[in-house]
Amino acid sequence: MDDSTKNFIEDIIDEELASGKVSEIITRFPPEPNGYLHIGHAKALCINFGIKERYHGKCNLRFDDTNPAKEDVEYMESIKEDIKWLGFEWDGLYNASDYFEKMYECAVKLIKEGKAYVCDLSAEQISLTRGTFNEPGTPSPNRNRSVEENLDLFERMRAGEFADGEKVLRAKIDMASPNINMRDPVIYRISHATHPHTGNKWCIYPMYDFAHPIEDAVEGITHSLCSLEFENHRPLYDWVTENCGFDPRPRQIEFARLNLTHAVMSKRFIKRLVDEKIVWGWDDPRLLTLSGIRERGYTPASIKDFCARIGVAKADSLVDISILEHCVREDLNNHAQRAMVVTKPLKLVIDNYPEGKTEQMYIENNPQQEGAGYHEVGFSKELYIEQEDFSVEPPPKYFRLKPDGIVRLKGAYIIKCTGFDTDSKGNVIAVHADYLEGTRSGEEGANMKVKGTIHWVNASDCVDVTLNMFDYLIEDGDGDYMDRVNRNSLTVLHGKAERLVADAPVHTRFQFLRQGYFIKRNERNEFNSIVGLKDSFKAR
């Protein structure tokens, strides 16, 4: 193991292995199935499954399905797909609901030992009596109910005699604790909702802070790795495992969550964007959900590289999205197929090229890959170039096509502009040029130096393509996320492409020369932009 790449979690694990406290490392990934996973979950996945791989241990996938009103099988299936897409394999697949009977037994044990009681206060009343950081909480009037009364009420809660919110079960800990989470937290609530796995068997459900440590303990989890917002919940986590009689007990360790510019790490807000149809769905390429990232064309390798680069820290920080884009760009540069696509076509007529003649030019498939070879592109009298690659009155240092100017057509000939056609409004609708014989790429005359090279497609055999161009969905800043939604984050272009892209399978990733990276979305030749060619990230 390379010590230079270790993080503080691995330092802790190494110490415990050396001391004999643990012999096998078992972690878990426990998402609540109330939405799709996002890039923040990718970090947690890489940490938990990375620990598994590094120590040849195990990692379970467990769905925290303790809130049936918000959970759905659809979300569970999407989570499994995302994890597999990243290349991870779980050892055990569990649901929190698998342990409902065990959790109920633990709750009864706490009641019998005088460590839990049934409370009649509403959620609002409990919140008001919780106290502040400077003032202790006010005990519930039900705090000193007898064990017998609490057991009877809790059994009747399970039997369905009470309405939602009418009663809760609270742990009896310390209403004056400096940690507000320890001030008699609610550990069971009533919810008459149909559960996706248990149906209507239960109408009481454990709270996360009670359920999670029990699940970890039952599964033999050695290290419960979670994000920093659970740090203040750790005393309660330990209280539950200790007072429910588990031995050995898992250890909770917190790490900084991922905060990314131009992104929102909130399933609740993402769901709002989906519900209000601001985005296409949970897999919208502008969202940083893992399904959206997959649709966008990001690669699993680039996501893992990104998580490795940002590291595992103890304090929260804001990560610039350019680092993520750099990782994606670097991976695609090494693996993406090259092709030529014109996004805003302008016809180019090679006047001195023979009518009806077609030659095959050769474009490198990927110059970064040794032995990747070339593919053929047809070349004839009429081509398409980008509108911005021709200017009647060019600015200084404009090295593309202009009246009497010369450029090289990528992989083909050097040409000289001889004129242009305009419509009734003065808009350029066609450019005319002559090709210079002997300047075809690879020929001796090809050594002639020109300052500009532009890409093109052959008019006679090119295909129409639709390009979805994405800008950031969320503008950086403060305030409500809805006020920062970029309503113009999608631009649709209709261009021309060489035939290669039409013959490629769906989900093929391309570098469109001078344009950026794209992924083929469907058989209708619709492409999603992945990331541009320009890199704003500066490695240190």
Image: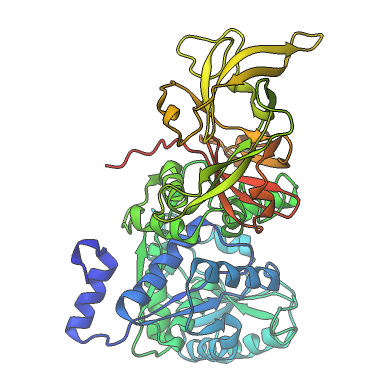
Compared with 231, 268 (above or below) is above
The answer to whether 138 is drawn above or below residue 117 in the figure is above
Does any portion of residue 171 appear in the rendered image?
no
Q: How is the image coloured?
A: rainbow
Q: Taking the image as drawn, is residue 221 in sight?
A: yes
Q: Quadrant of residue 203?
A: bottom right
Q: Quadrant of the C terminus?
A: top left
Judging depth in this view, the residue of 389 and 183 nearest the camera is 389
Q: Position of residue 451 (x, y in %)?
A: 43, 20
> Does residue 481 sit above or below 113 in this rendering?
above
Image position of 161 (left or right of 146): right
Measured from the top left, where is residue 285 in percent x and y?
Answer: 62, 49
Could you say which is closer to the camera, residue 56 or residue 418?
418
Q: Residue furthest right?
A: 424
Say above or below: 86 vs 407.
below
Residue 427 quadrant: top right
Between 176 and 505, the one lying in front of the other is: 505
Q: Which of the 4 image quadrants contains residue 94?
A: bottom right
Looking at the image, which residue is at 44% across and 60% down? 301
Quadrant where the N terminus lies?
bottom left
Image point (44%, 27%), residue name? 445
Percent coordinates x, y for residue 454 in the rendering: 54, 28
| Horizontal side, residue 199 vs residue 338: left or right | right
Specify whether 318 is left or right of 465: left
